[in-house]
Image (spheres, rainbow, N blue to C red):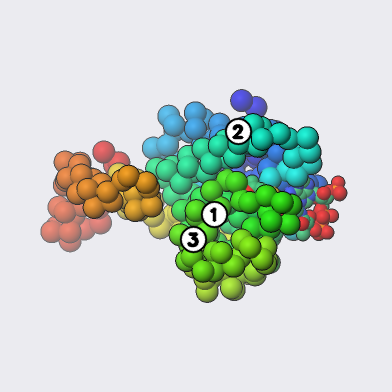
Amino acid sequence: MEYQNLSIKNEDNILVVTLNRPKSLNALNKQTMDELAYFFGEDNTPKQLAIKGVVVTGAGEKAFVAGADIKEFLGMDAEAGSKLSRKGNDIMFAIERFPKPVIAAVNGFALGGGCELAMACHMRVASEKARFSQPEVNLGIIPGYGGTQRLIQHVGKGKAMELAMTADMIGAAEAKTLGLANHVVPAGEEVDKAKEIINKIAKKAPLAIAKIIECTNAYYEDGANGYEVEINSFGALTRSEDFVEGASAFVEKRKADFKGC
Ligand code: CAA
């Protein structure tokens, strides 16, 4: 697939993915959704081991992503609405389950589907200019890309209900206090901070990082027993070469040289 709305740069083995429709505040239209699905699906499966992680950000001064493209909503019937929501949810799950760290560098408005995209990433670094909201009730709908579920996970039930029902927009500092943003940095430094975190993680054992992602997600997954996922993952990792290397390096008082196998 040729990317039109995503600009992708490989910066020292970190893929910086910029949603690039600044005139529409990077709203998620069909083409952008198709590109996100492709990027977090087929395009990266074979390359996953080769990259350190992914940073997702928005082009322009104003927005990370201002939500689903409202202009494409006109004339949408119930069947198309359900299909759109399912597709959005599938993309967010693909991001959440991506085996390398995915960090949202939230540079401005993260509204509706934009807030949902940020929440599906493993972490969020917010610029001081970031603004978060689930404003769908203003349009007569509800969050449709997993927002009703992930907002609770980040901020708890009462606050999630308040934010989704009032459509209040919150700033970066409040997002951090609520647990929605991991870090707040001066505007323009959010991508660098996200890369700094990914570079730190890249020094650890890659298979263990993938298992951290899997086990953490299991806590929230319907029908999954997170403790069992942890037990099985722990067992699997003790068979890895990196475990032998990590334990040997500790005993020999040297830095481990992990290979991802
Ligand atoms: N979809 C399509 N176009 C959008 C958009 C969106 N979500 N958000 C902004 N734009 C467009 C505007 O239409 C405008 O385009 P034109 O110049 O062609 O008119 C351009 O981006 C700039 O926007 P504004 O002039 O409105 O900029 P502003 O600074 O005055 O306001 C804003 C910024 C507060 C973010 C405002 O644009 C806004 O409220 N946008 C809509 C936010 C929203 O409701 N998002 C939720 C969408 S629904 C959803 O996401 C459902 C889901 O869960 C999947």
In percent of the image, x 16 and y 41: which residue is there? 239
* Quadrant in the picture for residue 38: top right
Rendered location of residue 9, percent (x, y): 59, 42
Q: Secondary structure at mark 2?
A: helix
Rendered location of residue 167, percent (x, y): 67, 63
User: Residue 176 or 178: which is nearer the viewer?
Assistant: 178
Rounded to the nearest whole Å, what is the CA distance between mark 1 and mark 3? 7 Å
Q: Secondary structure at mark 3?
A: helix
Residue 194 shows which numbered tag?
none
Local crowd size for mark 3, using a 10 Å CA cut-off: few (<14), some (14–19), many (≥20): some
Rendered location of residue 201, percent (x, y): 39, 55
Would you name the residue on which mark 3 appears?
Answer: 152
Would you name the residue on which mark 1 appears?
Answer: 148
Would you name the residue on which mark 2 appears?
Answer: 83
Three-letter residue code for mark 2: Lys
Query: Is residue 165 visible in the rendered structure shown here?
Result: yes
User: Residue 46 or 141: which is nearer the viewer?
Assistant: 141
Q: Secondary structure at mark 1?
A: helix
Q: Which mark is first along the chain, 3 or 2?
A: 2
Q: Is residue 105 left or right of residue 72?
A: left
In percent of the image, x 54 and y 69: which residue is there? 159
Decide if ligand 1 comes within 8 Å of the CB at mark 3. no
Q: Which mark is first along the chain, 1 or 2?
A: 2
**Can you say whether 76 is above or below 52 in the image?**
above
Q: Quadrant of the N terminus?
A: top right
Query: Are the residues at dot 1 and dot 3 in contact (C-beta closer than 8 Å)?
Result: yes
In percent of the image, x 31 and y 45: which residue is there? 224
Decide if ligand 1 comes within 8 Å of the CB at mark 2. no
Count the numbered circles shown: 3
Q: Quadrant of the C terminus?
A: top left
In percent of the image, x 70 and y 38: which residue is there? 29
